[in-house]
Amino acid sequence: MRGSGNQNQNVGNSRRDFLVKTAALAGAGALLAGAGKKPTGASAPSSTIKAAGRIPVPEGQPIRLGVIGTGGMGTGHCDAIMELTKQGRTNVQIVAVCDVCDSHLERAKKKCEEKQGIKVDTYRKHEELLARDDIHAVLIASPEHWHAQHALDAIAAGKDTYLEKPMTLRLDEALALREYSLKHPDMILQIGTQMMQLPRYHEARKLIRAGEIGVPTLAQTSYCRSSKDGEWNYYGIDPDWKPGVNLDWERWCGSLGSREWDPKVYARWRRYRDFSTGIIGDLLVHVMTPLLLALDSPWPVRVVGSGSHMVDKAMENHDLTNITATMENGTQMIVAGSTCNEVGLETMIRGYKANLYLGNVNCQVRPERLFVDEIEARTITCEDIGNDQDVHRCAFFDCVRTRNAPPAGVDLSTKVMVIVDLATRSMWEGKAFTFDPKTMTASPA
């Protein structure tokens, strides 16, 4: 570990308090209550740590942020947040960063110190960062198998949390995180799903709620792209990585258990089924989440998925996926994903009386032939908000100040995780799965 708490901005932490908090978080040993099976990647936070709601951060005071995971995504978040602060769109100071890799830490520390003109502390263990009382919020950009534990510990430590997508690696973790988060509604938990801020999806929800398209019957969307060299192989491998010297490989593997050092797994974990759901959790969540929002966030109750290895046969996860999810109200959603062809499906919602087209900035209403005299064909003009991910980041920091509910909260994200997890299991096991929202359990159909 290479740093300590920011002592020149001490808020009264004694060394004893620091050690007590760190030990309580690190020693959280009770396994998560899951969906009928042993959870895959997290321990429950210790009951000795109480999540306590923060008072709003005053407008003139910067939000003090810690970043857990400073690989490509985490460092990208740092760059974006510092630029947003420079532009005056938010007011955030990144005061601490955490990663198991020294080179990642040094890169993030150097960037943040040079651009902000302040000291930035570094940590190998997230528990030590979370033990600091002078940090208001954390941004978690660790690999998927760490998401649940990092988020649980952050909430327990009283930190508002921006958690990268997918919310968790497996459904049992999502259900446990949802339960814990709902027990502490005074803490902000926002999932970093892109496209959630796009106005067209919110307009679509208004239209559906108003009965403008009749009963919504079938929604469809996709996330398709291609690569000559294999998806996620663009993450480079540093020949200077030395486990046990400048990289804590054992800690990175975490709850998934010890295994032989593999720099490809470390750098390109999205390609491997033990560490990621691949296309589904990394890409499709971006399009499924806002579409589920537009449908008024029903629970999925039946999911079928199919996957193929068409071109990138070296990748464990599939490079072609198709999902059909049935909602509790009967509406169905079709989702296509590909990293071997970039032509996707048109994003739309079919209704009994009219259809909604959501493939560009605006929301278009087109009546079914039988209802052209009842439904007006029209375009609802929507604001072009620019970089929606930047808007999403700013929305989180606004919530930290106002204590308002986040725009991509734990409940909607859990519903998405039902689709992610059950589609993944369906692809590998060759069977359909059902989910019961009353008992919060999943089972083969």
Image (tube, helix red, strand yellow):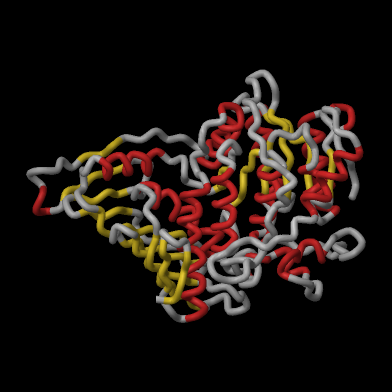
Query: From the viewer's perspective, is residue 83 above or below residue 98?
Result: above
Q: Quadrant of the C terminus?
A: bottom left
Query: From the viewer's perspective, is residue 171 above or below residue 167?
Result: below
Of residues 53 and 150, the one drawn nearer to the viewer in this rendering: 53
Can residue 219 be seen in the rendering of this structure?
Answer: yes
Q: Give me the residue at 39% from left, 50% from top.
A: 297
Q: Quadrant of residue 389?
A: top right
Q: Give me the residue at 82% from left, 47% from top.
A: 22
Q: Give me the residue at 66% from left, 26% from top.
A: 91
Residue 276 location (% of width, % of height): 61, 66
Residue 173 location (% of width, % of height): 59, 60
Can residue 78 be seen in the rendering of this structure?
Answer: no
Query: From the viewer's perspective, is residue 434 above or below residue 51?
Result: below
Of residues 260 and 104, the one drawn nearer to the viewer in this rendering: 260
Of residues 139 and 152, the one drawn nearer to the viewer in this rendering: 152
Residue 269 location (% of width, % of height): 67, 66
Of residues 145 and 101, the one drawn nearer to the viewer in this rendering: 145
